[in-house]
Each structure stands twice: as structure tokens, then as C-alpha cells.
Image (cartoon, helix red, strand yellow):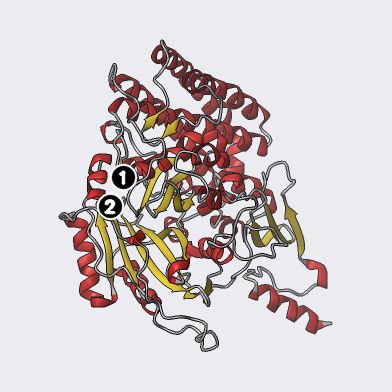
């Protein structure tokens, strides 16, 4: 039966597997394990791994369980009608996914957003960054068996959902950032309420740090696990917190400031270690910095003025194309839109952080232990629905 | 660069010299008879109708360096603040990609998008290349575009140049039916396992009821 073994190993190497140990034992030495799509932690995402003992020797991501054809749907609707369905891929961060779309359409149609509208838009973007990152943190907590870290962020998320509710009228899918600005002005007392919530929230962040990030159990499970070097991070083209955890201080808000972000004073949060801990800690640092940004936005916002530029009912621009991006909760989020001069886009391509970050999953999993899989996988800040679009 | 400047640059785009970039190489002898010569120029999707103005200096220097190296193999479509687009022939795409990576600092691909142009019987594949390693280039995106025939859509894969295109090219393969030569897995990725229809992002694929 020796011939059978050899051919299997050859086949495995051909498939891109790294055979860690000499293949000497019987045929069924490697165990195939399918993670997801029904796995409670994987989300709507499946990946197949092969195990040699405790070590993962092969990983094949299989997304697409929530593919909804957003890009095709865009071709049938006009620029404004596209907004409500475009925020479905990531409902917790819907302000950001419609933000870059609005920037791209504004460039194609050739309109300029009033200054007060730009501030409100940036504010919703920061609020949604908090909502998304808290949700992600809650799942990361329960993934590693830390139930308190599931409960706390889920509860504190309500602070920002409440603010967004009073501002936009919807808890998660706002359809608020539109080409030309935002739908309506802030309600009365919004600034004071937001400042109050931020003050409370910052106290909570300190408690998060104590109970979760300084927890020796979490540290042992994440530190030194899933190392992604700076060179590999650049080569794989990852983005967002995954990239910044590997020592590349790249943030779209800094390198390509959109709207009024060039007037805001903030630092790009990054770490150099490149392990799962850094990938889990960088979003936390982002949340802290985001509180500073929100305070500045509220402070510098003009007292009154228009929030939305007047648009035609069926806006259209000259034929052309554009590529605009923003920094979302999961990294750069870009829209490539081709217009043929009609009110409907000819082609819309959404380049999302999640889709770019899964490329790092096989890279990190192969060679690591099965027990490290949860901390590596979810620290990639991967949102399956967004990746599938 | 602010939004205003970006908008201003949009208005200032120059008209491309030749919008009819035709893939003149015959990809397959078998299909040669099916392919009709393209007489009509490409739709004006690559052109901007607005008046020409001075392109930004830094971006122009980048494109000039490319043009110096490759001459008329490069067709400059636009130069805007932070954004450049060039159109090349499929046979040159690998050499130009390697030059962009090694000499210009573009080290990863942000996105790969395919666009179907049935009027020209062509599919355009566009790589949006960005830079993490070079500080001065961080916000800049180089759009490297190439076109292939719809009947036998084949392009060389850039996976050996930019590792980050792997899933993007695989998605373009299943969504538009462009076969990437040299890519290890031209396979289904996002679509259902039992998908038995034409690639859905081709224009003739219609959503039911529309």
C-alpha cells in the first residue's frame, strides 16, 4: 500500500498543502474538518481544514453562503435607489459602506457637500465604527470563552445605537449618508447627549482593558499566535486593523483624507507584533481614538447651515469612472463605479476589507494548532456577509 | 487631498487620445472566425467629456516614468489627484506590473474588477494597485487596465507579481468568465456549487423579472 500513500502526499502538495511531518502512518492520518457554515462562531462562512494530529496542514476558505449579487443589483437601480440595499452586507457599519459610495457618486455627478453635512456624515461614520467594533469585540470575547466580554460590549453598543436612532430614525440600517450629504440635521440636544455617552463609554473602555485585554488567559491564547510579518501583510494586501497590527500605519482617513478629516487631529493606531493579540488590540485603540475624533467633530461643527446639496430626482453625470474609499471598521472600503452617462451605474465593484483579509487565513492557519484557530480566525476582523456582498 | 480638489480634478480630465483599445492578438485560432473586427470605438466610459486641465505634478511624474520606460505600450487614460489609469495590451501587462512593483512602489492590489462591454465585444479587467511600503505614495492608486475579447476571454494572471490578487482574480473568473492563465485555481468561489448559467456579471445575464 506504499504507493497509495505517496500519491496522496503528492496530491496534497499539489493542492498547496504543507505536509508538516513525513507521511508514514496509515491512510487516514490526516483528518478533514469542516468549520461552518453552521458553526456558531464562523458566521456564514465555511472553511475546510486538514489536521495532522493537532496541527493544521491545509486550509481552504469557501465563502459565498451569503452572496447576494449586490454588484449586479446595482446595475438595475439608479444611484439613489442603490443605497438601501448596499448597506445590507454590513448592517452594523452601514454608515461607512454608504459613505464611500456617496463619495464616488458625488465625484461622478459633480456635486459638493455642504460643510455641516460633511461633519454629520463623518460623525455617523465614527458612531457606526463604534457599533461595529463593539459587536466584533463581543463575538471575539465569546469565541474565546469570555462571556462577560460578550455581555458588556453588546450592552454598551446600545449607547451608540440610541444616538444613531435619534439622529437617523433607524437603529442599524440608516440609509442616512446619501450623495450630496445626509438626510436631515441633528436633533435638539444631540451634542450634549453624545458627549455624555462618550464620557460614560470611556470609563467603560478602561474596564474592558482590565477585564479582557489584561486578562492572563486572553494573553496566553493570543500572544505570539498567528504571526503575520510586515512583509507578508503587505504582500497579501490585507487592510485595516490586520495591517496596522503588523506595523504598517496605514489609515485611509490619514493617507487620503476625505470630507473634513484633514481638519481632525488624530493618530493612526498601530502595533508592531503582528500576532492575534495585536489584531485584537488595534480595534480597541481605534475605538479610543474614535472618541477623540467624535469630540472634535462635535466641537468644530458649524452651528447652522445646509446639510445636503440639492440633487436632481434622478442624478446622473457624464460618462466616466471613479474609485473612492473610506476607512471602515474593517479597513479600506472602496467603490469602483463606471458610469455611461445614464442615471444607473454601468458597473459597481465593491472592494471590501473582509474579502481582502481572508487571504491571510490560510497563510496564518497552516502550521498552527487547532486550538489557536478561533483566536486567529476572528481576530482577522472578518465579516462574512460583507466579503460575499 | 480634499474632496474639493478631487472634484476639481474630475472636471479637468483630459480626453484620451485613443479610446478604442482593441485586443488585436488572436487569442485562439479556433475562435478567430467568430471574432469580428471591431469597427466602432469603445463607449465613452474611459473618457470624460469635460475640458482638459493641468494634471497634478506628482502623479504626472509617476506616469511619465512609466511612459519613458515603455513608450507607446502605455495608453494613459487619466491623471487625477491620487488616481491614475493606464490601459495596456494583454501581452504587456505582466512586464508593466513587474515594473510597477519593483520600481514604482506599488506593492499590493486593492481590487480587481471586470467590466463587460458587449458593444466592443470586449471585457476590461482593471487592477487597482496601491502602496503600503512607500510613504509618499500611500494615498495613490494606479489603475492598470487591459482588455480581452469576450468570445475567448483569457488574460495572464498577475498572481506571481501581486499575491493579493488571488481571490479577486478568482472572483473575476466566475463572475465574468475571464480565464487567468497561470492562476492555480480558476474555480467557483462565491457562486452556488450548482451554478449552471453564464457568468452573472456579463451584460446579457438578466436578473429574473427585470
Q: Are marks 2 and 1 on the same chain?
A: no
Q: In which quadrant of the rendered view does residue B100 lie?
A: bottom left
**Chain holding disc 2:** B
Element carrying mark 1: loop
Q: In which quadrant of the rendered view does residue A375 lie?
A: top right
In this view, the residue in front, A370 or A249, is A249
Rendering coords of residue A200 (x, y %): 48, 16
From this view, report whether residue A11 is shown above or below residue B58: below
Residue that numbered label 1 is attached to: A256
Residue plotted at (36% across, 39% down): A268
From this view, report whether residue A40 is shown above or below residue B29: above
Element carrying mark 2: loop
Residue plotted at (53% across, 61% down): B203
Extreme residue in the bottom direction: B29
> Can you tell which mark lies on residue B82?
2
Task: Judge whether residue A214 can be spotted in this image.
Answer: no
Rendering coords of residue B93 (x, y %): 38, 74
**Chain holding disc 1:** A
Rendering coords of residue A313 (x, y %): 41, 35
In this view, the residue in front, A59 or A27, is A59
In this view, the residue in front, B129 or B84, is B84
Image quarter (top left, top right, bottom left or bottom right) of the N terminus of chain A: bottom right
Rendering coords of residue A155 (x, y %): 60, 22
Amino acid at each position: 500500500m506504499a504507493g497509495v500513500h505517496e500519491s496522496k502526499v503528492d496530491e496534497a502538495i499539489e493542492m498547496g498543502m504543507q505536509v508538516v511531518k513525513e507521511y508514514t502512518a496509515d491512510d487516514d492520518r490526516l483528518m478533514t474538518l469542516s468549520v461552518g457554515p453552521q458553526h456558531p462562531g464562523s458566521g456564514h462562512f465555511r472553511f475546510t481544514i486538514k489536521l495532522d494530529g493537532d496541527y493544521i496542514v491545509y486550509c481552504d476558505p469557501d465563502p459565498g453562503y451569503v452572496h447576494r449579487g449586490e454588484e449586479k443589483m446595482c446595475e438595475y437601480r439608479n444611484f439613489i435607489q442603490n443605497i438601501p440595499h448596499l448597506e445590507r452586507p454590513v448592517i452594523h457599519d452601514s454608515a461607512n459602506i454608504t459613505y464611500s459610495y456617496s463619495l464616488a457618486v458625488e465625484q461622478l455627478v459633480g456635486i459638493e457637500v455642504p460643510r455641516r453635512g460633511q461633519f454629520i456624515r463623518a460623525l455617523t461614520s465614527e458612531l457606526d465604527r463604534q457599533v461595529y467594533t463593539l459587536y466584533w469585540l463581543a463575538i471575539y470575547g465569546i469565541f474565546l470563552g469570555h462571556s462577560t466580554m460578550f455581555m458588556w460590549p453588546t450592552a454598551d453598543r446600545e449607547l451608540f445605537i440610541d444616538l444613531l436612532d435619534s439622529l437617523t430614525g433607524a437603529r442599524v440600517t440608516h440609509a442616512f449618508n446619501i450623495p450630496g450629504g445626509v438626510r436631515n440635521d441633528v436633533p435638539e440636544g444631540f451634542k450634549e447627549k453624545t458627549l455624555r455617552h462618550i464620557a460614560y463609554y470611556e470609563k467603560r473602555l478602561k474596564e474592558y482593558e482590565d477585564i479582557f485585554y489584561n486578562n492572563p488567559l486572553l494573553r496566553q491564547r493570543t500572544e505570539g499566535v498567528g504571526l503575520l510579518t510586515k512583509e507578508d501583510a503587505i504582500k497579501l494586501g490585507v487592510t485595516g486593523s490586520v495591517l496596522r497590527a503588523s506595523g504598517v500605519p496605514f489609515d485611509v482617513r490619514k493617507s487620503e483624507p476625505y470630507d473634513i478629516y484633514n481638519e481632525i487631529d488624530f493618530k493612526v493606531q498601530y502595533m508592531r507584533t503582528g500576532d492575534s493579540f495585536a489584531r485584537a488590540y488595534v480595534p480597541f485603540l481605534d475605538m479610543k481614538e474614535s472618541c477623540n475624533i467624535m469630540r472634535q467633530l462635535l466641537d468644530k461643527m458649524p452651528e447652522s447651515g445646509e446639510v445636503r446639496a440639492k440633487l436632481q430626482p434622478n442624478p446622473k453625470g457624464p460618462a466616466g469612472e471613479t474609485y473612492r474609499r473610506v476607512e471602515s471598521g474593517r479597513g479600506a472600503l472602496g467603490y469602483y463605479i463606471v458610469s455611461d452617462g445614464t442615471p444607473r451605474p454601468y458597473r459597481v465593484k465593491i472592494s471590501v476589507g473582509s474579502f481582502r483579509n481572508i487571504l491571510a487565513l490560510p497563510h496564518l492557519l497552516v502550521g498552527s494548532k487547532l486550538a489557536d484557530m478561533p483566536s486567529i480566525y476572528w481576530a482577522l476582523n472578518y465579516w462574512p456577509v460583507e466579503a460575499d456582498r | 487631498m480634499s474632496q474639493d480638489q478631487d472634484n476639481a480634478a474630475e472636471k479637468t480630465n483630459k480626453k484620451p487620445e485613443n479610446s478604442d483599445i482593441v485586443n488585436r492578438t488572436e487569442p485562439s485560432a479556433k475562435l478567430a472566425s467568430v471574432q469580428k473586427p471591431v469597427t466602432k470605438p469603445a463607449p465613452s466610459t474611459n473618457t470624460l467629456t469635460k475640458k482638459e486641465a493641468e494634471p497634478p505634478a506628482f502623479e504626472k511624474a509617476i506616469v511619465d516614468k512609466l511612459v519613458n520606460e515603455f513608450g507607446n505600450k502605455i495608453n494613459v487614460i487619466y491623471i487625477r489627484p491620487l488616481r491614475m489609469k493606464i490601459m495596456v495590451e494583454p501581452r504587456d501587462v505582466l512586464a508593466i506590473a513587474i515594473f510597477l512593483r519593483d520600481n514604482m512602489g506599488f506593492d499590493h492590489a486593492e481590487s480587481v474588477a471586470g467590466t463587460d462591454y458587449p458593444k466592443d465585444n470586449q471585457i476590461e479587467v482593471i487592477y487597482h494597485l496601491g502602496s503600503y511600503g512607500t510613504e509618499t505614495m500611500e494615498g495613490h492608486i494606479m489603475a492598470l487596465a487591459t482588455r480581452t475579447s469576450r468570445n475567448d476571454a483569457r488574460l495572464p494572471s498577475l498572481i506571481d507579481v501581486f499575491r493579493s490578487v488571488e481571490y479577486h482574480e478568482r472572483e473575476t473568473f466566475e463572475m465574468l468568465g475571464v480565464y487567468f492563465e497561470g492562476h492555480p485555481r480558476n474555480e467557483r468561489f462565491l457562486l452556488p456549487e450548482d451554478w449552471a448559467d453564464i457568468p452573472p456579471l456579463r451584460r446579457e445575464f438578466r436578473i429574473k423579472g427585470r
